[in-house]
């Protein structure tokens, strides 16, 4: 695996390799693949249990570590959402909960789900596991830094969880952490809680930067021979673009966290104007609370796409494989991902239409925001056009994909309401916003995560998850989540503001009581249904059916490893050579309805392959 | 087959829910009907796209279910179709954006005859001030705020003397007369929001923000804080009473000016009374 690589030798080896693989009677030129420009990566193999499972440098193990840690935070976030829904639906049963508790739960739920669950799961979890496998690399290019990345994330999670146990509890400032209230008395956890949050976020950004460098450089530099950028699976494109966004956006979060820490600890005034509190003028002056919002959303809006783009990529691959059809308009899909990523840096202030920023910004940001709807819509069209005239397996993976399309289109359309500046005025800060972003960046990406778990579990564990349990899991989750968030939009129309511990008896809100009870019950059921997956995984690991290699008949490289599950180094003695894109399904003239990326053109000479 | 049927029921259910929902807009009581109309337009266009996309998806699920002996179509790209879809979407989006921007233009340009109302927010309550006979509000500073000067009006500012101080968390407004709400905060972010008026804007400490509307229905309304402001956020309520011109002017006549308020405190001080701090 660590042989010195000689360019000349490799070229000769390659042409003989082609002759071996083909019938021997064809022109080898059509199978020509440019030789590798760099030598093979030297891998550090573990020597002990700790090096193999704890401080491990194998991206696949790091991916699983990320995944499990993120899922742990997700379960905490889920329990917090149950407590919130208990208060909102059945306040008489939540007598133990004060307004302080409620706001702390709201804040921690939001921050955990967006940053520590979704971001870590998509990039740290799926990114680590899939990037090297899908681009045909033996591992990430900087395995040691990759290991540090996970452990930094682990410490960040530990610090975050520690804030539940400090005096005053965790911060209750809302996940957006808007100053000045975030660091003033009157907001729960304005002492230790907020400090630990800011430290945890800073650690997360540092850890993420280490991982992000790995994902980017591995994709740019360590692709196997023949894996051109336009032959990469869309999963890799999604994760790659999201990583670039994250590397540009997270620094804004880091500086705002540092500035806020200074405001809190050293009484600087980056975000703090002159403030009168309990009759006293505080020792602040001259700072701008709106500056924080600009910094926060300069991170926060790309963050939405940091979660969404990997989901877009993964769902494209899942739909294509299970519809047995090439993804429709691959090039359009790639440019849409890149275009959405670029545009996402020009829309941040649509979160701030009623923040008190200069109102003339509204024209600019409404226009950019609605422009982003065009590439997004193109992606949706291409997903459904991939289904059209396909040969669709209606299995659990496909069900999650279909659920994704429904929830994503629903949430995307409500985004057009909120992006359209004057329509946002009555709806902002109401339950309409809650419904919108949960549908579009909570439920929709979650559908993709679940689909991806059912799809790649056979690769990771070598066993097939139970389809029957999977169907129950899907239908309860999809129908339940839809009935939580679809009606919730209408609470926003009434005008019910978000972040209200209770409504008292405002005349136009009494009609919402029934709906709140219904939503809460649905939330309890959907949350509980997630334990079906955990049960399914445990059951499968113990007694599940052994998975054959490539059970879904997919084309991409992760299914063509030397062993299942893949070992350290992924591909055995010889790295795969790529001859085509990963979407050659149902090619006319081919014997099977799929042609793996490693199949040389000479092996399928009689097929009508269009795109390679 | 079951899957397609359930998805179909979800879409049909969504449409029926929208038609028969008992939960919808609180009756509008201001000039911002254009916002409601743009929402309705967006609902038709967006809702139409949602239903169309989902029905197409469901059709595919029924029509192209997996059969061992069938192959999917092989067609990587269709330039013409992609072009048509791109332009159709762009047109649709532009059609939604245009009315949105037109109404925003009205929202940020306050009519000349609007009466100014100074709304001051604090954790957790509201106070109001109106310009006096000179039609101008006096300048203010947070450091001047005291019991005898709840808005921190600069004592040297001649415009401040006749400012009308409303000693209540309910403000009265004249029906059919535009109001420019000036928002200030002494501590954290707040947002003075009346659902019936549709409009809102954050109050930001350190600066003055504004928005305007024209109330057009006599009645009492509840004010809610719409920007999270700490643990008392949900309890930060106030009120608005929209009155006809005659009633409004009668109410206005009963209010105290800043000069009168200062004089009253001076008298109290002379009397040696101490007032508890706010």
Image: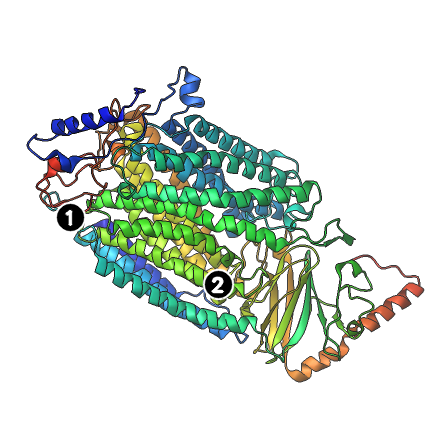
Residue, disc 2: A364
Q: Are marks 1 and 2 in contact (CB under 8 Å)?
A: no
Indicate left or right for A63 with B269 as reference: left
Residue situated in front as seen by the camera: A424 or B40: A424
Residue situated in front as seen by the camera: A189 or A571: A571
Query: Nearer the viewer's eye, disc 1 or disc 2?
Result: 2
Spatial CA span between label 1 and label 2 = 44 Å
Q: Does residue A52 sit above or below A62 in this rendering?
A: above
Say which chain tag 1 marks.
B
Residue, disc 1: B72
Label 1 crowding class (10 Å Cα cut-off): few <14, some 14-19, many 20+? many
Total marks in image: 2
- Residue at the extreme bottom of the image, as rendered: B246
Indicate left or right for A529 with A79 as reference: left
Residue situated in front as seen by the camera: A466 or B108: B108
Q: Does residue B265 sit above or below A101 in this rendering?
A: below
């Amino acid at each position: 695996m660590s042989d010195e690589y000689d360019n000349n030798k490799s070229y000769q080896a390659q042409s003989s390799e082609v002759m071996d693989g083909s019938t021997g009677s064809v022109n080898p030129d059509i199978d020509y693949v440019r030789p590798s420009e760099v030598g093979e990566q030297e891998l550090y193999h573990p020597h002990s249990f700790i090096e193999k499972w704890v401080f491990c440098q194998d991206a696949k193990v790091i991916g699983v570590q990320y995944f499990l840690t993120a899922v742990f935070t997700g379960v905490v976030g889920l329990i917090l959402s149950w407590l919130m829904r208990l208060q909102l639906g059945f306040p008489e049963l939540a007598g133990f909960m004060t307004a302080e508790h409620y706001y702390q739960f709201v804040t921690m739920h939001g921050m955990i789900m967006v940053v520590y669950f979704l971001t870590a799961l998509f990039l740290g979890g799926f990114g680590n596991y899939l990037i090297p496998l899908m681009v045909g690399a033996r591992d990430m290019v900087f395995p040691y830094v990759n290991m540090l990345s996970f452990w930094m994330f682990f410490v960040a999670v530990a610090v975050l969880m520690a804030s539940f146990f400090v005096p005053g509890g965790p911060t209750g400032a809302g996940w957006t952490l808007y100053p000045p209230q975030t660091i003033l008395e009157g907001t729960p956890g304005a002492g230790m809680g907020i400090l630990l949050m800011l430290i945890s976020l800073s650690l997360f950004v540092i850890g993420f930067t280490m991982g992000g460098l790995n994902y980017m450089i591995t994709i740019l530099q360590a692709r196997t021979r023949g894996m051109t950028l336009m032959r990469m699976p869309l999963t890799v494109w999604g994760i790659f673009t999201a990583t670039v966004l994250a590397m540009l956006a997270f620094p804004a979060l880091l500086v705002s966290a540092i500035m806020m820490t200074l405001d809190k600890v050293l009484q600087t005034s980056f975000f703090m104007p002159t403030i009168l509190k309990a009759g006293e003028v505080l020792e602040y002056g001259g700072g701008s609370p709106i500056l924080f919002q600009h910094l926060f959303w300069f991170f926060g809006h790309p963050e939405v796409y940091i979660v969404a783009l990997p989901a877009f990529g993964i769902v494209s691959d899942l739909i294509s494989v299970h519809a047995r059809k090439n993804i429709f308009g691959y090039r359009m899909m790639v440019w849409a991902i890149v275009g959405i990523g670029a545009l996402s840096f020009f829309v941040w202030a649509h979160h701030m239409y009623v923040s008190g920023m200069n109102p003339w910004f509204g024209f600019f940001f409404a226009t950019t925001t609605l422009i982003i709807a065009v590439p997004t819509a193109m992606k949706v069209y291409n997903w459904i056009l991939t289904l059209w005239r396909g040969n669709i397996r209606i299995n659990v993976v496909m069900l999650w994909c279909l659920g994704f399309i429904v929830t994503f289109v629903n949430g995307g359309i409500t985004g057009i309401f909120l992006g359209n500046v004057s329509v946002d005025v009555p709806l902002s800060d109401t339950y309409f916003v809650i419904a919108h972003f949960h549908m579009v960046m909570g439920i929709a990406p979650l559908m993709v995560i679940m689909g991806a778990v059912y799809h790649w579990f056979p690769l990771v564990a070598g066993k097939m998850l139970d389809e029957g349990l999977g169907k129950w899991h899907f239908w309860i989750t999809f129908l339940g989540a839809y009935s939580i968030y679809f009606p919730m939009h209408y609470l926003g129309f009434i005008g019910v503001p978000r972040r209200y511990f209770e409504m008292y008896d405002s005349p136009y809100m009494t009609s919402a009581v029934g709906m709140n009870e219904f939503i809460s019950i649905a939330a309890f059921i959907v949350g509980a249904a997630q334990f079906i997956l955990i049960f399914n995984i445990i059951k499968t690991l113990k007694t599940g059916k052994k998975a054959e290699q490539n059970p879904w008949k997919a084309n991409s490289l992760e299914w063509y490893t030397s062993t299942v599950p893949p070992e350290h180094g992924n591909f055995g003695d010889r790295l795969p050579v790529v001859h085509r894109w990963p979407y050659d399904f149902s090619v006319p003239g081919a014997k099977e309805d799929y042609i793996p990326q490693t199949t040389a053109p000479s092996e399928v000479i009689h097929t009508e392959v269009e795109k390679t | 087959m079951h899957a397609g049927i359930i998805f179909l029921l979800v879409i049909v259910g969504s449409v029926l829910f929208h038609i028969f929902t008992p939960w919808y807009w609180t009756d509008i009581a201001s000039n911002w009907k254009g916002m409601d109309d743009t929402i309705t337009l967006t609902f038709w266009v967006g809702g139409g796209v949602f239903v169309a996309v989902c029905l197409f998806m469901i059709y595919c699920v029924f029509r192209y279910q997996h059969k061992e002996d069938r192959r999917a179509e092989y067609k990587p790209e269709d330039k013409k179709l992609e072009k048509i879809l791109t332009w159709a979407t762009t047109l649709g989006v532009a059609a939604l954006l245009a009315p949105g921007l037109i109404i925003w233009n009205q929202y940020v340009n306050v009519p000349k005859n609007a009466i100014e109302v100074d709304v001051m927010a604090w954790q957790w309550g509201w106070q109001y001030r109106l310009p006096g006979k000179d039609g101008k509000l006096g300048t203010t500073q947070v450091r001047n705020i005291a019991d005898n000067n709840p808005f921190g009006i600069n004592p040297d500012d001649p415009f401040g003397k006749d400012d009308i101080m409303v000693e209540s968390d309910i403000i009265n407004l004249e029906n059919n007369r535009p109001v420019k709400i000036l928002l200030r905060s002494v501590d954290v972010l707040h947002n003075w929001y009346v659902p019936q008026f549709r409009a809102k804007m954050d109050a930001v400490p350190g600066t003055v923000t504004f928005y305007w509307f024209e109330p057009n229905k006599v009645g009492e309304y509840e004010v809610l804080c719409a920007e999270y402001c700490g643990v008392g956020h949900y309890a930060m309520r106030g009120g608005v009473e929209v009155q006809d011109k005659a009633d409004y002017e009668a109410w206005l006549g009963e209010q105290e000016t800043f000069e009168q308020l200062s004089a009253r405190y001076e008298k109290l001080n002379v009397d040696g009374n101490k007032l508890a701090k706010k």
